[in-house]
Image (spheres, rainbow, N blue to C red):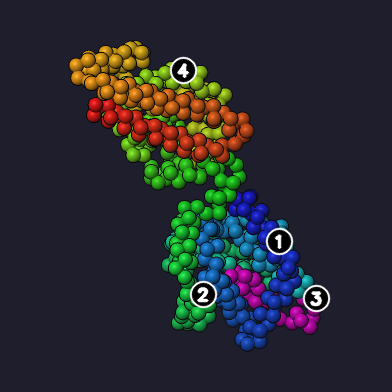
Amino acid sequence: MGNTFKWIALKAGTALGRHVPSLFYQLYYREIYRQLFEITNDPKMAVDLSYKLGYTAADESAQRQTAVFRMFPSDPVKVLEYIPLMWQIYFGTPMQKYTTEWDRSDPERPILKYKIEIDPMTFDIGKDKVRDNLPFDQFWYNQNCYGALMAGLLTQCSSFVLKLKGKDQRIILHNTKNALHGDPYFEFHCQIIPQEEFPSFELIEGFDKEHYYQQFLGERSAFESQADNIWKKITNQIDIDQLDEMMEDSAGLMRVPLRKLIKKTAKMSPFELFDHFTNDEDKFFQVLGFLSVHIFNEKGQLLEKLFSNDEIRRVYGHIFLFMKNNAAKLTPLSVIHDLKDYFLQVLSGIAPEVFIQNIDKLSAEEILQNYYQGAQKALTDLGIPFSELKSNLYQEIAQYGRNSDQQTTSNFTEQQLIKREQLYGELSQQMMIISGAIISVPMQFSLMLFYKTLAGSTELLTGLFKTLRESGQKIVDILDSLKDL
């Protein structure tokens, strides 16, 4: 469980504990056992019923708190990390002096053991001879001691999360050790098992719990149903652990969506993807530049439309080469260095260590040139004839002007000439807007890094895309108008 949400949740648990002290739970717990024992006169049956009672009680509560449980992670191992939080909320006191131990001898059914030195449920029990007259040392059945009710409750809560997330696994807990049973500590035995092996814990066989709960839950309005559907979609994409990772530092804001994007598009884990480029990190940045161009073009095929005109694609070819050849001047190397450091933070935990170390060894100049090299390959795919370009942009425009003048003198009217000059002016203006937007990106990034934040990176990139899209569309419209003259 992450530190941020753990702190928030535990503060909430502490507030609850101040209003409902652990002594209340201890006495209430003991009275439940007293009633069960008086009814059954059998310690084993009392434990069995206690477990099922906790399981059933938590079921009804879970049905009412579905929205909350949707925020829990879908990984069973991650769910088990919330046991201390559930303990604190239930007992009103933190889980103290505990250790954990994994048993992975059966990979399909791993076991996590919580060994707890301080058990608030058994504290001082036995000193009141009048009240403490139950056979506590005999409360043992089916791997459960006196803490069976709590084990049943947590079994329901943890398994409900997995059911809600559509997982084919469940979690079952047992209170296998207890001071009242003569053990040196309290122990929760938490096992992840296949769904088909999950037993039934119904108190009453054939009980129609869905119909029973419905009378308390009531009919949901159209607005509530719509809100539930929206919340379901949100929590299907992100859970508490991911939110916590995003809030821990700025790298988490990029790491979480990057991990999801790689899994969705590459159909593999980030670790596997980055491992393909280990010891070939130059190629990684080339691929990054290549994909950046093509991903940008996916938004309405803007670049393809822009490059449909030969003169325009040649002009943009020169603009790109100018940026590539002067990358170190247009982009402060300190900014690239800071971006590299940020990228290394993003990669932490999702890429091989060797890959991260090799990236760290690359200079800012090497990263820039590899990125531009990949981008140039993509722009070539989209129609920019880099091999056919003139030596400079002036010669390119001059050649275009000569061709236009020949056509003008023979075909254009005076009104068309005026219109053409106006369109050329607008065309130059839009090209300057696009060039300025692209060149200003490094400076904006440097300002964000200066203030130690990348929170505005999304706004920056969104603004850049909007500028390129709007100006690009205007250029296409201008070219269409020129063709109509």
Mark 3 or mark 1: whose residue is earlier in sequence: 1
Would you name the residue on which mark 3 appears?
Answer: 127
Q: CA distance from mark 4 to mark 3?
A: 83 Å
For mark 1, give the secondary structure. Answer: helix
Q: Residue at x 55, y 34 (%)?
A: 342
Name the kind of residue labelled 2 in the image.
Leu
Dot 2 crowding, Cα within 10 Å, few <14, some 14–19, many 20+: few
Q: CA distance from mark 3 to mark 1?
A: 28 Å
Q: Is residue 235 visible?
A: yes
Would you name the residue on which mark 2 appears?
Answer: 217
Magenta residues? 126-153
For mark 4, give the secondary structure. Answer: loop
Q: Residue at x 54, y 70 (%)?
A: 64
Q: Which mark is residue 14?
A: 1
Q: Residue at x 76, y 74 (%)?
A: 125
Q: Is residue 107 visible?
A: no
